[in-house]
Image (cartoon, rainbow, N blue to C red):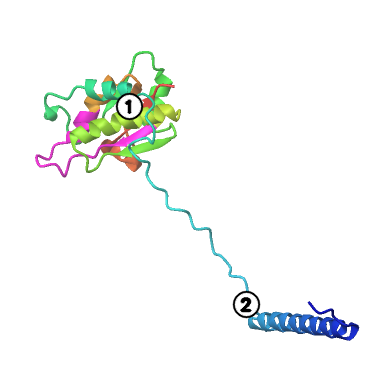
Amino acid sequence: MPLLTHSMKCMVNKKTSNNTQINTQQTHDDDLIFRDAVADVRPMKSDGRIEPVRKRPLAKPLNRIHDDEFETESTILSDPADLRDVEVGDELFFARAGIQLKLQKKLRRGELPIEDELDLHGYTSAEAKIAITDFIQHCKQMHIRVIRIIHGKGYRSQEKLPVLKTYVAYWLPQHKDVLGFSSARQNDGGTGAVYVLLKK
């Protein structure tokens, strides 16, 4: 490889210096063009915060700790013999022995904060039984004590009977983790839903 003479080295250095000056000038020009383009831009003012859409919780938990326990609980719940035992407008209430009257009153008045809910609209009775058992197990895992189960009033059933409401009224007292339940207030579903108090 031929050696560079002093004059050739100077030419190379000069060329590199010129390129640097050109690049610096182009960058400066680009900055001026950009600033000129956005000179009239102003930040948008927000009238209020947009609340995110809250999704309803899934009926089934992501992980089941004890499948054998789940299967036992879902299969031991007996079904009502007569679906006409409960009527559309009936208010439901149940409390295990030993539950303080003060706590019962709070449950009936809807004064206990609801931590989660399950909507059974569109479920068959078989699907609803599994969903309820699964949901209660999920709540146990998450240390949730107060839930709402929406069973509907039965206006859409073929015989105009509160089918799911009747099943729920029979199933919940049989579940070992249910301490009590009560029909909800009007703004929480009325006789189409129940507040449920679970064991710690």
Q: Amino acid at mark 2?
A: Val
Q: Is residue 190 above or below residue 1?
A: above
Residue 161's mark? Answer: none
Q: Nearer the viewer, residue 24 or 57?
A: 24
Q: Is residue 8 above or below residue 195?
A: below
136 is within the stretch colored magenta: no
Residue 41's mark? Answer: 2
Q: Quadrant of residue 16?
A: bottom right
Q: Nearer the viewer, residue 165 or 32?
A: 32
Report x, y in % for residue 86: 17, 29
Look at the numbered disc 2 and give the secondary structure of its residue.
loop
Range of residues picked out in magenta? 147-168
* Foreground disc of the pair 1, 2: 2
Callout 1: 10 Å neighbours few (<14), some, many (20+)?
many
- Looking at marks 1 and 2 on the same chain, the residue that comes earlier in the sequence is marked by 2
Report x, y in % for residue 132: 29, 31
Q: Which residue is mark 1?
A: 181
